[in-house]
């Protein structure tokens, strides 16, 4: 299955998934998926080291019945070049041990892909690779991907980056 990151990962993920007959799972910005938010995991990055602060906040505690009806949504907060953001995923979208490839338009710090890997692994999937159309090597995003392979189609040189 392919997991794509909102918003521009939605341009590239679905056609590839359709082409090979695989499922597409959307990783969405906060508050857009139906269901009950079960918790948020927060990670802090400093250069190449990743620190998990161990906090698991229960935001909404619904009954089990309610979870079954509405579905369960998990969240990951992350840091990127210009601040913080959050991605969410429906737990029911993924089956245990399902193999996943993550697609996005661009990798810079790797914060977005790292949060995506964490979401999928928390839901029981096995992330086999990440793929992006553009990679910005100066941000060393590969270092945050827990050793997962990263496929990048183009890496702009310094001159090209000025126009991105
Ligand atoms: O490697 P990173 O430092 O995490 O940066 C990469 C992310 O930044 C951009 O999205 P953005 O968060 O700007 O959101 P958008 O798709 O809604 O524009 C881009 O589409 C990636 O998803
Ligand atoms: N430096 C950058 N240029 C274009 N898009 C981006 N998304 C995140 N960082 C970016």
Image (tube, rainbow, N blue to C red):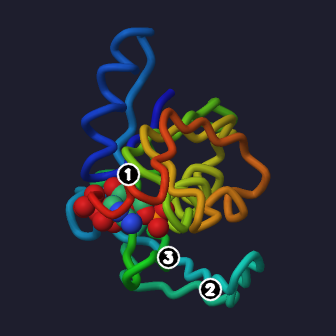
Measured as percent of width and height from the top left, residue 118 is found at: 61, 60
Q: Give the structural element (helix, strand or loop) at label 1.
A: strand
136 to the left or right of 160: right
Residue at image point 28% right, 40% down: 10
Labels 1 and 2: the sequence-earlier one:
1
Q: So how many labels did they put on this image?
A: 3
Relative to 49, say whether 142 is above or below: above
- Pointer 3 residue: 78
Q: Give the structural element (helix, strand or loop) at label 3.
A: strand
- Pointer 2 residue: 44
Measured as percent of width and height from the top left, residue 66 is found at: 32, 62
Q: Quadrant of residue 26?
A: top left
Q: Nearer the viewer, mark 1 or mark 2?
A: 2
Residue at image point 64% right, 42% down: 150
Residue 13: tell me if it is visible: yes
Q: Residues within 10 Å of mark 1 (few under 14, many from 20)?
A: many
- Pointer 1 residue: 27
Ligand 1 picture quarter: bottom left
């Amino acid at each position: 299955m392919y997991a794509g990151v909102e918003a521009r990962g939605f341009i590239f993920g679905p056609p590839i998934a359709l082409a090979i007959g695989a499922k597409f799972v959307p990783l969405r910005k906060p508050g857009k998926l139906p269901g009950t938010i079960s918790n948020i995991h927060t990670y802090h990055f400093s250069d190449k080291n990743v620190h998990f602060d161990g906090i698991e906040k229960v935001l909404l505690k619904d009954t089990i019945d309610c979870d079954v009806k509405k579905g369960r949504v998990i969240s990951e907060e992350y840091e990127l070049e210009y601040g913080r953001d959050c991605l969410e995923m429906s737990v029911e979208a993924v089956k245990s041990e399902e193999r996943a490839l993550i697609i996005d338009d661009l990798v810079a710090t790797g914060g977005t892909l790292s949060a995506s890997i964490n979401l999928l692994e928390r839901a029981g999937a096995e992330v086999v690779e990440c793929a992006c159309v553009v990679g910005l090597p100066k941000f060393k995003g590969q270092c945050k991907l827990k050793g997962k392979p990263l496929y990048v189609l183009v890496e702009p040189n310094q001159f090209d980056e000025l126009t991105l």
